[in-house]
Image (cartoon, rainbow, N blue to C red):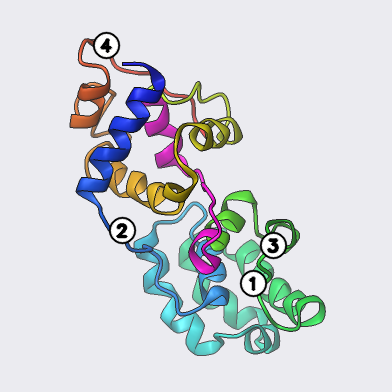
Amino acid sequence: MTRQERADHVLKRLRQLYPDPPVPLDHTDAFTLLVAVLLSAQCTDLRVNQITPALFKLGNTPSKLAAAALEDILAIVRPCGLGPQKAKAIKELSRLLLSEHQGVVPNSLEALERLPGVGHKTAQVVMAQAFGVPSFPVDTHIHRLAQRWGLTTGKSVLQTERDMKRLFPTDSWNKLHLQIIFYGREYCSARGCDGTVCELCRECFPERQKPKRTRKA
């Protein structure tokens, strides 16, 4: 198969497996999604979903979290890892949303990326899932699987993002990045598959005999 043929096959199979993938992070609006995605850095979605009810009880709006004591935010988010940095970022971005955006999460990638603790991937998740803007956030699952399926050289996360955007139709991006994440967790994890085990790896490269080395994100 060519690279494009593999991409077309992957899209077809993932649509069959996950026709309507849910957003794995619990949230109620753009602000709570933004905070949840920020917390998910180097932390599992399961752990974040265990933490956010207490955090959003403390404050589920920029005004409430900007007014909350940093120590109280830290006490809640510490189990997510990188607690001091994340707590400081949450409080500061809440303050900036109030002072610069009238307390509203901006629907601009550039404006989101200027907020403390909000990187390119986090901003893209918010654009895709809160505002419905076609985006292709690349996390470690997507970066790894795109390489295993021969869809990218994997030299960097940004290169993977560019390659995936070229291969897949724009109207598929917002669901597809979730579909790949769910497939990676269920069938093609870092340890559960080496590029020769799961069904999609075998379908994309039926003659592959040796494990596929992947570049880290």
Return the disc, 1 or 3, that comes first in the chain's sequence.
Answer: 1
Crowd class of label 2 (few under 14; some 14 to 19; many from 20; radius 10 Å) = some
Residue occupying the far right of the picture: 99
Q: Secondary structure at mark 3?
A: loop
Does residue 74 show up magenta in the picture? no
Residue under label 1: 90
Question: Tag 4: Cα neighbours inside 10 Å, few (<14), some, or many (≥20)?
Answer: few
Is the residue 180 above or below the residue 206 in the image? below
- Tell me the amino acid under the disc marked 2: Pro
Foreground mark, 3 or 4? 3
User: Which of 41/127 is in front?
Assistant: 127
- Residue 171 in picture, x, y percent from top left: 45, 50
Q: Is residue 86 left or right of residue 47?
A: right
* Marking on residue 210: 4
Image location of residue 152, percent across then percent down: 48, 25
Q: Main secondary structure of the magenta part?
A: helix
Which of disc 2 and disc 1 is earlier in sequence? Answer: 2
Neighbours of disc 1 within 10 Å: few (<14), some (14-19), many (20+): many
**Left or right, residue 85 beside residue 142:** right
**Residue 31, percent across and down?**
58, 76
Q: Is residue 58 visible?
A: yes
Task: Say which amino acid is labelled 4.
Answer: Lys
The numbered mark, 3 or 2, whose residue comes first in the sequence reads: 2
Q: What residue is rendered at 60% in x and 85% in y?
A: 61
Q: Nearer the viewer, mark 2 or mark 4?
A: 2
Distance from disc 1 to disc 3, alpha carbons, whole Å, reads: 19 Å
**Disc 1/disc 4 C-alpha distance (Å):** 44 Å
Q: Element under label 1?
A: helix
**Viewer-side residue, 86 vs 28:** 28
- Mark 3, residue position: 108
The reply to whether discs 1 and 3 touch (Cβ–Cβ < 8 Å) is: no
